[in-house]
Image (cartoon, rainbow, N blue to C red):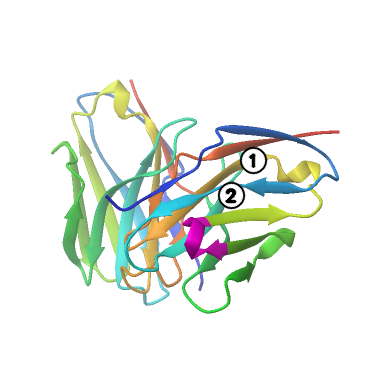
Amino acid sequence: AQSVTQPDIHITVSEGASLELRCNYSYGATPYLFWYVQSPGQGLQLLLKYFSGDTLVQGIKGFEAEFKRSQSSFNLRKPSVHWSDAAEYFCARANNLFFGTGTRLTVIP
Amino acid sequence: DTEVTQTPKHLVMGMTNKKSLKCEQHMGHRAMYWYKQKAKKPPELMFVYSYEKLSINESVPSRFSPECPNSSLLNLHLHALQPEDSALYLCASSQDKAGYGYTFGSGTRLTVV
C-alpha cells in the first residue's frame, strides 16, 4: 500500500536548537509529498510540498525539506526552532491526500 | 478568493438529529474532499469528489452522506450519528486529485450527544 510513515510520535527540542522531523514513504513512482502543521484546535497549514525537480524544498516559517529517493525519505528541517513552532506536524502524500500519523513537537525555553 | 469556507464551525447534535455540514470554495478547484480527524490523530480521508462525481468512499458508514451540488459546494449530511462520530470534520479542495494545491478549511467541530 502507498503510505507515509512518521517514526517519531513526540519530539522535544530547546528553543533555538535545530529540528529534523522524519518522514518515510512507500511508493513505486515519485510521490507528491507534503508537510502540514496543525496547532491545537486549528486547521491544517501547508508548510511545503514536493512534486519534482530540486530535491531541497523551501517552505514557509523557515522550514525546508529534502527528498531523498535512495532513502525513501522526505524529512522536515528547521535550523533554529521558535517557541511558536510547537504543534503537530503531518507528512502526507498524494494522490488524494493521505497523512502520516503525525509528530508532536514540544519546544522548551 | 483563496479559501475553503466551512460552516458551521461548531455543531452539537443528538443521535436522532439530521444535520448538514457545508463546504464552499471559489478557486475553480475540481476535486473536493471530506476528512475526519479525532483528537491527537491524523486526518482520515472519507470521501473524494472529482468533477462533481463521487470517486472515492473510504468505507464510510451510510449515516454519513456526501453531496456535491455544484463545482463550488460540498455538503456532508449527517443522520443517526453515534457519540464516537464526534470529531473535527475538515473539507479540502485541489485543482485535481493529483494534488496540485490542496487547500483546507478550518473545519467543523462536531459533538454528538
Q: Residue furthest left?
A: B62
User: Which image quadrant for residue A79?
Assistant: bottom right
Disc number for residue A87: 1
Q: Chain of mark 1?
A: A
Disc with the residue nearer the chain's start (2 vs 1): 2
Q: Is there CB contact under 8 Å for labels 2 and 1?
A: yes
* Towards the viewer: B92 or B75: B92
Tell me whether marks 2 and 1 sit on the same chain.
yes
Residue B50 at x, y percent in the picture: 23, 68
Q: Residue A75's x, y, as percent?
A: 59, 54
**Three-letter amino acid code of the residue under disc 2:** Val
At label 2, counting other C-alpha atoms closer than 10 Å, the crowd grade (few under 14, some 14-19, many 20 or more) is: many
Instruction: Indicate the position of residue A88 as horizontal and vertical percent values.
Output: 58, 40
Decide which of B35, B11 is in the foreground and name it. Answer: B35
Instruction: Give the structural element (helix, strand or loop) at label 1.
Output: strand
Mark 2 highlights which residue?
A: A37
Q: Is residue A18 magenta?
A: no
At horizontal 27% and vertical 71% (from top left) the residue drawn is B71
- Mark 2 to mark 1 CA distance (whole Å): 7 Å
B3 displayed left or right of A19: left
Residue A72 lies in the magenta stretch: yes
